[in-house]
């Protein structure tokens, strides 16, 4: 359509002017209008739909470029956080909360992004976090590099649909190349799992504790793998409890339950129970209230005594039924209607030698009942001995300046585990939790897809090399697009070298050379500042992290490319 519109005009250039380059449509458009107005030899073309459509293309192009620029700016914001030598970001929220992290998903999640296309990159990072749990920065950096190449291709006059289709073919081919590079791993090979978890932790703020956290993450995930469904791991079965005090070195894996609260012993109840029979209750051990908000005025003392006596008898009745089943530990769910327990009920529970943990969150009930292999009790009338859980020990332990409750030695324990994370301050504690979550996700990836690839930019350089060779086999525009996208993947090793303070151009050139000689596992060793066989250095990552990063990044870029207008609806 554009070609037809231009072919109707005989170009007459004024003296000393150079013909416009067709690669710059804006300049072409401006120069066409100038020549047609200045030269009397050319008549004004009749206003037709064809010329209007050309003007319309200009707007579409502007919107596409604006979207790409916005998305690229988001990508460049997190680029410095990539790799083990990447920088950390300090995020200050409107509420005054401060977060220090270099986790891509966390940084983007907290950023106030308004531009719709830029928001897509934030969602992209969230998707990677859900699918793989690690590589959230990588996926955004790759998307940014692909968008930069798309910009160059669009300026060269290639149609967005052609670019989009080529990108899809690149993504399919990349998955084949990565799968061919991958090394199979068995779940019984604990060392390999620890290596991949360590690689994930090495780029975090708490990297110096990776030798402690990596085995801990592996043991936690392997303890919750169900033999009936060996490929599925639900990370909700691994509960992370944070407790301020100590250092990250004091972090431990607990086979049982940990509550970040102390025992309710205001009435002198027990704080340690052996051979515990544990009940999880969802009803209140307190005097009932009226259903509607109203006040009862009692003017007679005898009537007042009668009310207090009735309240006492009501509470005693409940506690007798609880004691009759042999229960000696009560976990009471938090109540919003009225107090779950009163001082009076705590007094009687202490007399009955029952240990009480109150204000258990509603969200934790499912995890607790699964761990204890018991049933939650919603009404005192349903209190039966068969609904109780059994544990060898329930005790209150002093930690730092606070106390926690540990339940260990659980009989017929469900497939769950608890990690108690310690830290000297809240910032370290939060970052340790995020890092541990990433390490758990990496081990989960290996459980669902049992393959490893090298880290350190090795898979990206190998992809770039093989896609570059493949582009020579293709024809036409497709070949040109594939070659550009192959170059874009080199952004990962380039950024790794740049963030480590190395010479990125020299490193990437040497890396290309080594891969061309057939060393497919050659990567950047940022510790030594040189190129080594990265598999021998134990820098490995799950195949799923790399494949999902490529797939999700190409999907997001294709979507941004296809947008040619933004319609705001008031």
Image (spheres, grey):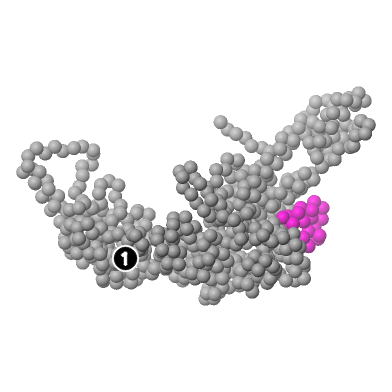
Residue density around tag 1, few if under 14, some if 14–19, many if 20 or more, within 10 Å: some
Quadrant containing the C terminus is top right
- Magenta segment boundaries in residue numbering: 468-488
Q: Could one spot residue 230 in this view of the protein?
A: no
Q: Left or right of 487: which side holds 430?
A: left
Whether residue 353 is visible: yes
- Looking at the rendering, in which quadrant would you find the N terminus? top right
* Residue found at x 60% / y 34%: 568
The residue that appears at 11% across and 46% down in the rendered structure is 307
| Residue at mark 1 | 397
Q: Nearer the viewer, residue 503 or 285?
A: 503
Count up the numbered dots.
Answer: 1
Q: Residue at x 37, y 57 (%)?
A: 364
Q: Position of residue 542 (x, y in %)?
A: 59, 66
Answer with left or right where residue 397 lies relative to residue 554.
Answer: left
Instruction: Give residue 103's quadrant in the image.
Output: bottom right
- Is 523 in the magenta? no
Q: Nearer the viewer, residue 22 or 78?
A: 78
Q: Is residue 109 above or below residue 183?
A: above
- Would residue 472 be counted in the magenta stretch? yes
Q: Secondary structure at mark 1?
A: strand
Residue that appears at 82% across and 42% down: 23
Question: Residue 304's x, y, as percent?
Answer: 10, 43
Quadrant of the rendered image containing residue 463: bottom right
Rendering coords of residue 488 (x, y %): 72, 55
Residue 73: % across, % down = 64, 46
């Amino acid at each position: 359509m554009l070609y037809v519109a231009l072919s109707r005009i005989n170009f007459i250039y004024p003296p000393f002017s150079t013909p416009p380059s067709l690669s710059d449509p804006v300049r072409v458009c401006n120069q066409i209008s100038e020549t047609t107005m200045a030269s009397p030899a050319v008549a004004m073309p009749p206003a037709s739909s064809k010329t209007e459509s050309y003007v319309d293309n200009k707007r579409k192009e502007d919107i596409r470029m604006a979207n790409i620029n916005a998305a690229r700016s988001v990508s460049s914001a997190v680029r410095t956080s990539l790799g083990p030598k990447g920088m950390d970001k300090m995020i200050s929220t409107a509420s005054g909360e401060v977060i220090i992290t270099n986790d891509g998903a966390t940084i983007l999640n907290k950023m106030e992004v308004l531009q719709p296309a830029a928001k897509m990159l934030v969602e992209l990072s969230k998707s990677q976090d859900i699918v793989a749990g690690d590589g959230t920065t990588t996926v955004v950096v790759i998307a940014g590099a692909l968008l930069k190449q798309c910009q160059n291709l669009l300026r060269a006059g290639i149609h967005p649909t052609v670019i989009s289709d080529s990108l899809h073919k690149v993504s399919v081919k990349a998955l084949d190349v990565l799968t061919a590079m991958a090394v199979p791993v068995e779940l019984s090979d604990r060392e390999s799992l620890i290596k991949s978890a360590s690689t994930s932790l090495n780029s975090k703020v708490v990297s110096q504790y990776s030798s402690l956290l990596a085995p801990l993450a592996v043991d936690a995930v392997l303890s919750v793998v169900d033999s009936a469904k060996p490929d599925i791991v639900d990370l909700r079965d691994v509960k992370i409890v944070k407790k301020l005090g100590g250092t990250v070195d004091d972090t431990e894996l607990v086979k049982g339950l940990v509550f970040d609260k102390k025992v309710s012993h205001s009435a002198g109840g027990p704080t340690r129970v052996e051979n515990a029979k544990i009940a999880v209750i969802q009803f209140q051990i307190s005097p009932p209230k009226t259903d509607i908000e109203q006040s009862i005025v009692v003017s007679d003392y005898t009537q007042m005594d009668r009310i207090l006596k009735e309240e006492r008898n009501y509470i005693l009745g409940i506690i007798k039924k609880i004691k009759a089943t042999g229960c000696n530990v009560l976990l009471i769910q938090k109540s919003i209607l009225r107090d779950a327990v009163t001082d009076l009920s705590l007094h009687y529970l202490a007399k009955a030698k029952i240990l009480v943990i109150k204000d258990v969150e509603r969200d934790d009930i499912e995890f607790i009942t699964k761990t204890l292999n018991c049933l939650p009790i919603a009404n005192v009338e349903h209190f039966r001995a068969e609904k109780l859980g059994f544990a060898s020990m329930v005790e209150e332990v002093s930690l730092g300046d606070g106390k926690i409750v540990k339940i260990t030695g659980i009989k017929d324990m469900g497939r769950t585990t608890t990690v108690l994370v310690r830290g000297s301050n809240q910032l370290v504690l939060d970052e340790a939790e995020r890092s541990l979550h990433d390490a758990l996700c990496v081990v989960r990836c290996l459980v669902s897809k049992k393959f490893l690839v090298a880290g350190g930019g090795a898979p990206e350089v190998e992809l770039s090399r093989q896609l570059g060779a493949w582009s020579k086999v293709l024809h036409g525009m497709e070949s040109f697009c594939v070659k550009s996208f192959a170059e874009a993947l080199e952004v990962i090793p380039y950024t790794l070298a740049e963030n480590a303070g190395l010479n990125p151009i020299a490193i990437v050139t040497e890396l290309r050379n080594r891969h061309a000689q057939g060393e497919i596992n050659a990567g950047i060793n940022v510790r030594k500042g040189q190129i080594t066989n990265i598999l021998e250095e134990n820098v490995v990552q799950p195949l799923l992290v790399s494949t999902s990063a490529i797939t999700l990044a190409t999907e997001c870029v294709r979507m941004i490319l296809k947008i040619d207008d933004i319609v705001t609806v008031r």
